[in-house]
Amino acid sequence: MKIICSQEQLQLAVNTVLKAVSSRTTMSILQCILLEAGDGLCKLVGNDLELGIESMLDAQILEKGAIAIDAKMFAEIVRKLPNQDVTLSMSNRDENHILTITCGKSEFNIPGQPAEEFVPLPAIVRNQPLRIPQGELKEMIRQTIFSIAIEETRPALTGELLEVKQGNFHLVSIDGYRASFRKLPMSREFEETSCIIPGKTLNEIKNILSNEEDDMVALYFTGKHVVFELNGSVVVSRLLQGEFPKYENIFTSDYSTKIHVNRKELLMGIERAALVARESKKNPIKVSIQDTGMVISSNTELGNAHEEIDIQLEGNPLEIAFNPKYMIDALKVMEDESIVLQFNGSVNPCIIHQEEGDLCKYLILPIRLN
Amino acid sequence: MKIICSQEQLQLAVNTVLKAVSSRTTMSILQCILLEAGDGLCKLVGNDLELGIESMLDAQILEKGAIAIDAKMFAEIVRKLPNQDVTLSMSNRDENHILTITCGKSEFNIPGQPAEEFVPLPAIVRNQPLRIPQGELKEMIRQTIFSIAIEETRPALTGELLEVKQGNFHLVSIDGYRASFRKLPMSREFEETSCIIPGKTLNEIKNILSNEEDDMVALYFTGKHVVFELNGSVVVSRLLQGEFPKYENIFTSDYSTKIHVNRKELLMGIERAALVARESKKNPIKVSIQDTGMVISSNTELGNAHEEIDIQLEGNPLEIAFNPKYMIDALKVMEDESIVLQFNGSVNPCIIHQEEGDLCKYLILPIRLN
């Protein structure tokens, strides 16, 4: 094998596939990335068996071949090379699988492993893709990923429900205490479908997606995998099996109390009140909603906090309590200046949505006070 | 006690004194900062018994008084308050020592401790100060602090020698394997003196010093303490007792091998060669100096690296080996484009200095190869 490419292009490709290399495995082949120079095409591949990423490399191929090389070491070397042409070569007859990296006056010889031992990405039959702007998908993930379940007692909840339904594209996460819903109206028709994507996959995809509205990502669905194609890279992820909770009915539009409030003021007030509640995460903040305004308070052995917030109230006054972190997480990812909170008494969930538009909705269970 | 000040000024003062609050103590009074409103003067004080910082606060004093308040909690609250006027008050008759913080529509009541329990800063008789530009002192610390000793077997080496000698101001650090020397010619005469300042003090001072050449810092010396006065703050530090090694003679000007080299090229080459040496810090890099150039190489079970660097050689060719970290640390903090390395055979130290000027000098012991 012998290829020549620019240090910049190589670094970009390595950093992309690195996101699919496991850092916690003890199997040395899973710590590797595959470097493969084929017929006019050169690619890098990372695969932790749950998530796989393949990235094309714009390279001059002088001799075909392939090798698996320790990902962390290779990435560190590539990052520190000068911004010049890099030559990657390996004697195809050499049974020691030594990769030689030369760039300017630097030369490295790094022992690798035979390419055959690398676990290939699953072969996927690609049907019609769903295309959406990368910036939109990135924003949708950012606005919902925080409420996936951490504990694995119900594996399906450690991922997000992806749904194509009635001309809309949905992402939904539910951790048992709260739910996040984000919608994107689709410009073209696409067959209705749904699947559960692991949270890890979405977190990694988010970091690869560009912010540009014009860059598109193509999604392919099979029963067991989802494929993302973007920027010369292919991301293949296993899907989570199991039942995702029905979420449509939990976002009720009924309310006994409804308030209109400035999002940033509410966020800052809750963040401050949460400071004296920090010692134990079990400490709730209390919310008192009156005609005259909203009072957020917390009272622990660390001290007490009292925050007054201007609101517009429709319906009944209310006393209710929340885990402040859940409120903060939702209020932080919203973009709107003015938002709406709806309540149905002190033991039913609070629903947060936009003042105008219905692209994102959040549900948070209250904490019952004695 | 009752004072009114701006949130911005308060945050600045809190963040400054916070650097002298211990995070590892179990004595709750040492986790506090003192807030004191006196005759027309308001100040905050932090004191971990080794390092103390006092910061003036520009405030309107409505009622005098003092309280010790948990530093971390107070700093977090102040940081999250809106950028408006903050009122800090405490009933002087209240024996519970509750500090009330109000700002806009926020109110906090935080239990504190009696001011009398706070350990005051040592009283220092201030003689003639030594004044130097803050930016210069900051740079001097940055260029020498990395080679203080970490282990406390010889306490004096965990600090830096500060010296006024022959019209120059010196900072010197020695950890047993390497030494760093930085000089500043003084514009005014000052009595010759020397003391050993704890590394922690210098690290904290570095973060308070401004980059502006025009801002001055005043230093006062007593037998047991050093005082830094800057930007409305006073930093008092204990000095380290003990003998600091004589360093003048180790920076010999004799050499059997001398090279002139581009600093960045050498740094990048060593950093790359160090990548395959990383597994164990004991792995040295080998340096081969010949008429034709310099070769840096390392060879471990992770692979091997070979770097060629252009040099100008005076004297004999040489084979020598180093801990790459020591070389990297010194080369990183120097600013010069071209530098000089001097050697006296493969078992004596290497001395690194500027091509032009003698403001900074570094000494590094080699590793003996079998």
Image: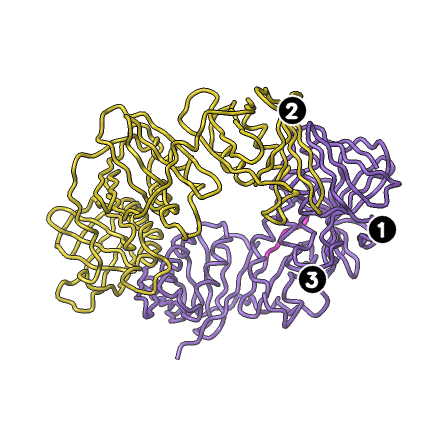
Chain colours: A yellow, B purple
- C-alpha span from label 2 to label 1: 43 Å
Answer yes or no: do the residues labelled 2 and 3 have beta carbons within 8 Å?
no
Q: Is residue B235 left or right of residue A8?
A: right
- C-alpha span from label 2 to label 3: 63 Å
Q: Which quadrant would the N terminus of chain B be assigned to in this image? A: top right
Q: Residues within 10 Å of mark 1 (few under 14, many from 20)?
A: few
Instruction: Name which residue type carries label 2.
Output: Gln
Q: Is residue A249 left or right of residue B62?
A: left
**Residue A358: quarter of image:** top left
Image point 47% across, 65% down: which residue? B342
Do circles 3 and 1 both sit on a common chain?
yes
Query: Which chain does tag 2 point to?
Result: A
Instruction: Name which residue type carries label 1.
Output: Glu
Q: Secondary structure at mark 3?
A: strand
**Residue B252: quarter of image:** bottom right
Query: Which chain does tag 1 point to?
Result: B
Q: Is residue B22 left or right of residue A131?
A: right
Query: Which chain does tag 3 point to?
Result: B
Do circles 2 and 3 both sit on a common chain?
no
Q: Which quadrant would the C terminus of chain B be assigned to in this image? A: bottom left
Rendered image: mark on residue A290: 2
Instruction: State the extent of the magenta-drawn residues as a range.
Output: B182-186
Give the camera-side residue of A162 and A121.
A162
Q: Residues within 10 Å of mark 2 (few under 14, many from 20)?
A: some
- C-alpha span from label 3 to label 1: 31 Å
Give the camera-side residue of B55 and A133.
A133
From the image, tell me which residue sits under label 1. B116
From the image, tell me which residue sits under label 3. B196
Instruction: Name which residue type carries label 3.
Output: Ile
Q: Secondary structure at mark 2?
A: strand
